[in-house]
Image (spheres, grey):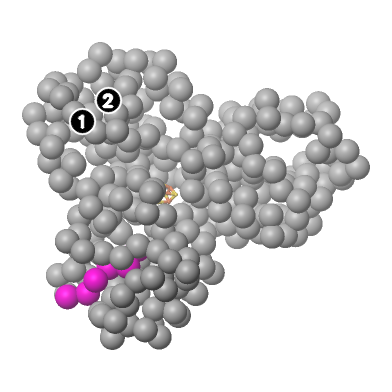
Amino acid sequence: MNLTKAKYSGFCFGVKKALDIVDNLKGDNAYILGELIHNPQVIEKLKERGIQILEDINDITKGTIVISAHGMPDSAIKQCKGLNVIDATCPLVKKVHMISKEFETEGFTTLIFGDKHHQEVKGTAGNLKDCLIASNIEELKALDLNRKIGIVSQTTQEVEKFNKIVDYVKDKAKETKVYNTICSATRQRQEAAAELAKTMDLVIVIGGYNSANTVKLKDICSEITETKHIESTNELKEEWFKGKQNIGITAGASTPEWVIEEVVEKISSF
Ligand code: SF4
């Protein structure tokens, strides 16, 4: 078997930055608001260091709280008054917050192309008086688009789908402003995965099941060749590789290099 890794895969700069920030954080009154990044192995290691992952700040009155890479609405950060707040929000997510607030100031309703249940989208929406959210054309059809609409994207969405959303909205809205906020790390990983999948018999995508960008990589590769999405080595099954010559490996932006290496090692042992 030949194993080939995608040209771009694994940690992006936003995730590296968030992990650097928590590097010196220790347990006893050390908290992270929301999952720092969407990777189960990393979250487990943080918990082993005594760091607690919170959904909301509830009755925390002292200690250090880190805002996750996916960001939070300003109101949630204000609630942390009195705590030592460390903001690990990716600068590219901050940019989406800034653009959507500007849309609102200019009299445009922000439409976020993304998953309404994802922390990043909730963070962007939470800063706005009113906004629309859709992850596909079907969801768009249910929305009132007869107004001035500013479009942004969840940073980890697919470019092609974003363009389709933009075309649909342009046709219905009174006026549109468009800002493609899909981050370059996401674009690079998606393009590299598609390129890799073209010549592979099987692609293994590694990353959290709750990692939006990993799921997108799986979706992209699945359209081109046989693809399996795993979080860790113990999910690998030897039978997947029977009769397969060329195996591609890619990983989401929140997947640590050591997890990728473990997977490579296990596949090589088959
Ligand atoms: S995927 Fe992009 S937006 Fe998300 S943390 Fe990484 S660099 Fe930032």
Q: Secondary structure at mark 2?
A: strand
Residue 156 place in picture, x, y as percent: 46, 54
Query: Which quarter of the picture shows residue 134?
Result: bottom left
Of the residues under marks 1 and 2, which one precedes in the sequence?
Answer: 2
| Residue at 30% across, 17% down | 26
Number of the label disc, if any, that sits on residue 31: 2
Up-down: is 62 above or below 112? above
User: How far apart in space, not on screen, are marks 1 and 2 (Cα)?
Assistant: 9 Å
Residue 96 place in picture, x, y as percent: 30, 59
Query: Type of residue at label 2?
Result: Tyr
* Residue marked by disc 1: 57
Residue 245 place in picture, x, y as percent: 87, 45
Give the magenta-colored segment's residue range. Answer: 107-112
Number of the label disc, if any, that sits on residue 256: none
Label count reads 2
Query: Which quarter of the picture shows residue 36?
Result: top left
